[in-house]
Amino acid sequence: MRLGVLDVGSNTVHLLVVDAHPGARPIPATSQKSVLRLMRYLEPDGSIGDVGVQAIIDAVVEAVAAAQEAGIDELLAFATSAIREAANGEAVLARITAETGVDLQVLSGEEEARLTFLAVRRWYGWSADRILLLDIGGGSLELAQGFDEVPDVALSVPLGAGRSTIEFLPDDPPSTDQVARLRGHARAVLAEAIAPLRDLPAPDHVVGSSKTIRSLARLAGTVEEGVGSSDRMVLTRRGLDDWTPRLAKIPADARPALPGITADRTFQIVAGAVVLSEAMRAFGVRELEVSPWALREGLILRRLDRMS
């Protein structure tokens, strides 16, 4: 069957179309993306402003048209932290459904972590043993650890790259003091948040997923030979910490000239680097491997499992 996955996130509205059936890996057919950066449209009371809501609706309409043109059999549409945490989230969802016909499923932070963990486990297989997952979105950081396809612990903390940029890095480029304040904030939040993970056995494999982490790995990581035709992308904390202060001194509009930094992530990549560095430090992680599969693939895999 041909599945469309519509991800209404904090930074983008992204449609991924795949050909899939139970027992086989999903094969990407096409994709379509609109850059929103929804954090820009938040009002002082935490609601999404009218301009932001209209931007979401316009992007969803474009995505639905692209999905229909691709000949999908089913659309899996979901929303994450930006709408989940908005003061007017329910009203926004109702308006999206009324004007586009799309009924968005709102995932909790824990569900995001669990679905992403499922995708990572399937990608790496059982030979990876116990996995620790780090996933940075626009609004939140997801963490999960476990040995099976369902993690022992899955949690979400408000340290997304977009959220952190808006709250701590208002200048472009950010000042050294602003970066330092974000680093201190991330360190304090993580020190408390990871308590449920401290009593678990040490992971055998540490994996990072999400576009932000993939971008940072292309900039500051290395590519090693993997199994078959798959390359293994590895990011060390030393490499990340070496690049972060240099990245912070470059204006956002100039960062896409760097390897791996795309226009849709350029405004929030510094915050993503700081948060990832502190997350790795909190767990004592010196390097992580980067997964090409993340939340969207997790949703597809769960849908196929239910078909089975």
Image (cartoon, rainbow, N blue to C red):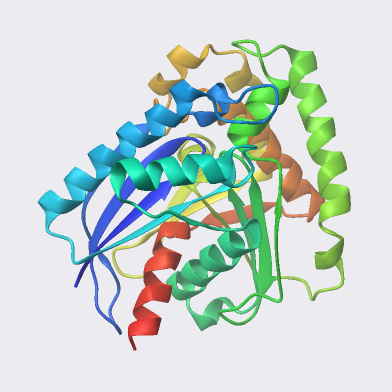
Residue 86 visible at all: yes
Residue 211 visible at all: no
Q: Residue furthest bottom?
A: 308
Q: Is residue 93 above or below residue 88?
A: below
Q: Is residue 142 above or below residue 200?
A: above
- Measuring from the top left, give residue 218's x and y in whole percent: 45, 39
What residue is at 28 percent from the left and 69 percent from the top?
26
Q: How many marks?
A: 0
What residue is at 45 percent from the left and 66 percent from the top?
298
- Measuring from the top left, give residue 255's x and y in whole percent: 46, 19
Q: Is residue 261 above or below residue 122?
A: above
Query: Can you say which quadrant of the picture contains the C terminus?
Result: bottom left
Is 249 placed left or right of 96 in the picture? right
- Measuring from the top left, give residue 91's x and y in whole percent: 52, 41
Q: Is residue 37 above or below residue 6?
A: above
The residue nearer to you, when weighing 123 against 14, is 14
